[in-house]
Amino acid sequence: MSALVGAAAAYDDTTVKFFNYLSHQNKSYISLDEFNMRLAVFTKTDDFIEKWNANGENTSNVGHNYFSDMTSEERFPPQSDESSISNEINLYSYYAYDENQTVPTSVNWVNVGVVTNVQNQGSCFGGGSAYAAAAALSASLAIQTS
């Protein structure tokens, strides 16, 4: 046990945070080179987080998540431009405004039946965005096809 404590003392605070992050996110790497690269990315992310949270002018706090060891290229891959979309698709043809159309002042989508029930995320840490996206897509599809 004392050897483990001594080994941990040899690392700086960021490296210890990184090991905790790896354990929490259940991550591992295939080589020492990748480990060192991910540690460098994590260190840069951690520096940003520390500076942001220390700035009293910010009205929010930020923290680590599953993406903290990923480069910006991995988190935000280049998107294709509109020219790669088939010319047969008119992106703006889905809705035609009719000024004579009467619409209700509000719609309760729960009562209409297009909002899904609350889902149990179980142990899916950080999966709320995925559940929210799936629910939004499901509701949108239900509204469009009803």
Image (tube, grey):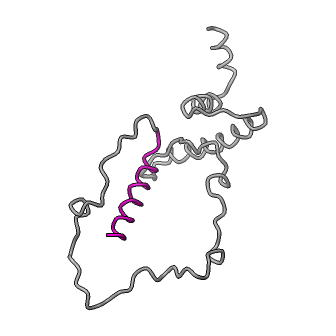
Of 45 and 101, which appears nearest the observer? 101
Residue drawn 38% across the image and 55% down it:
135
Image vertical order of residue 111 relative to residue 64, above or below: below
Asked whether, in this view, residue 105 is left or right of residue 18, the answer is left
Please tell me whether residue 131 belongs to the stretch shown in magenta: yes
| Quadrant of the image occupied by residue 42 | top right
Residue 102 locus on image (x, y percent): 22, 84
Image quadrant holding the C terminus, namely bottom left
- Magenta: main secondary structure equals helix
The span shown in magenta is 125-146
Image quadrant holding the N terminus, namely top right
Residue drawn 74% across the image and 36% down it:
36
Please tell me whether residue 145 belongs to the stretch shown in magenta: yes
Asked whether, in this view, residue 12 is left or right of residue 144, the answer is right
Looking at the image, the residue that sits furthest to the top is: 2
Asked whether, in this view, residue 121 is left or right of residue 33, the answer is left
Image vertical order of residue 79 relative to residue 14, above or below: below
Image vertical order of residue 127 relative to residue 88, above or below: above
Of 92 and 76, which appears nearest the observer? 92
Residue drawn 69% across the image and 37% down it:
39
Residue 97 locus on image (x, y percent): 35, 86
Residue 20 locus on image (x, y percent): 57, 29
Looking at the image, the residue that sits furthest to the right is: 33
Q: How many marks?
A: 0
Of 41 and 83, which appears nearest the observer? 83
Looking at the image, the residue that sits furthest to the front is: 145
Residue drawn 40% across the image and 81% down it:
95
Looking at the image, the residue that sits furthest to the bottom is: 100
